[in-house]
Image (tube, rainbow, N blue to C red):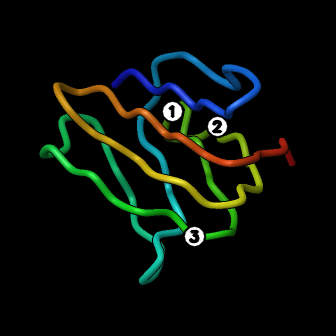
Amino acid sequence: MLLEILTPERKLYTGEVYGIQLPGVDGSFEVLDRHAPLIAALGKGKMKVLKDKSHAEHYSIEGGFVEVLNNKATVLVEGATAQ
């Protein structure tokens, strides 16, 4: 699926990924390829971008939202830093 991670200042990431693990306000959850449409609020915590089944990138985020639609995930966050 296509993933975009956006902050108010810049586009942090764009690319094809296997999935993402996100810190939701009610607990962590995972979005994988071909996920059903979803909009969810994100809390402060760690986000894991699964580039494939054996490689991942880690980010620390400050909260925001995620939208999943048509096999594209858009993560809008107030702030994020790569780990």
Q: Which residue lies under the disc numbered 2? A: 55
In the rendered structure, which amino acid carries the disc numbered 3?
Answer: Gly
Marks 2/3: CA–CA distance: 24 Å
Q: Residue furthest bottom?
A: 26
* 7 displayed left or right of 66: right
Report the side of 10 relative to 77 (left or right).
Answer: right
Q: Amino acid type of disc 1?
A: Asp
Q: Earlier in the sequence, mark 2 or mark 3?
A: 3
Tell me: 68 left or right of 77.
left
Q: Secondary structure at mark 1?
A: loop
Q: Which element is circle 2 on?
A: loop
Circles 2 and 3, Cβ within 8 Å, touching? The answer is no
Give the residue drawn at x 46%, y 27%: 3
Q: Amino acid at mark 2?
A: His
Q: Residue at x 49, y 40 (%)?
A: 75
Residue pictured at 68% horizontal, 48% vertical: 78
Of tags 2 and 3, the one toward the viewer is 3
Mark 2 and mark 1 residues within 8 Å of each other at the beta carbon: yes
Residue 71's x, y, as percent? 23, 27
Q: Percent x, y for residue 52?
A: 51, 33
Of labels 1 and 3, earlier in sequence is 3
How far separated are the C-alphas under marks 2 and 1?
5 Å
Marks 1 and 3 close (CB-CB < 8 Å): no
> Residue 31, which numbered label?
none
Q: Which residue is mark 1?
A: 52
* Residue matched to label 3: 43
Q: Residue at x 27, y 36 (%)?
A: 33
Secondary structure under the numbered disc 3 in the rendered image: strand
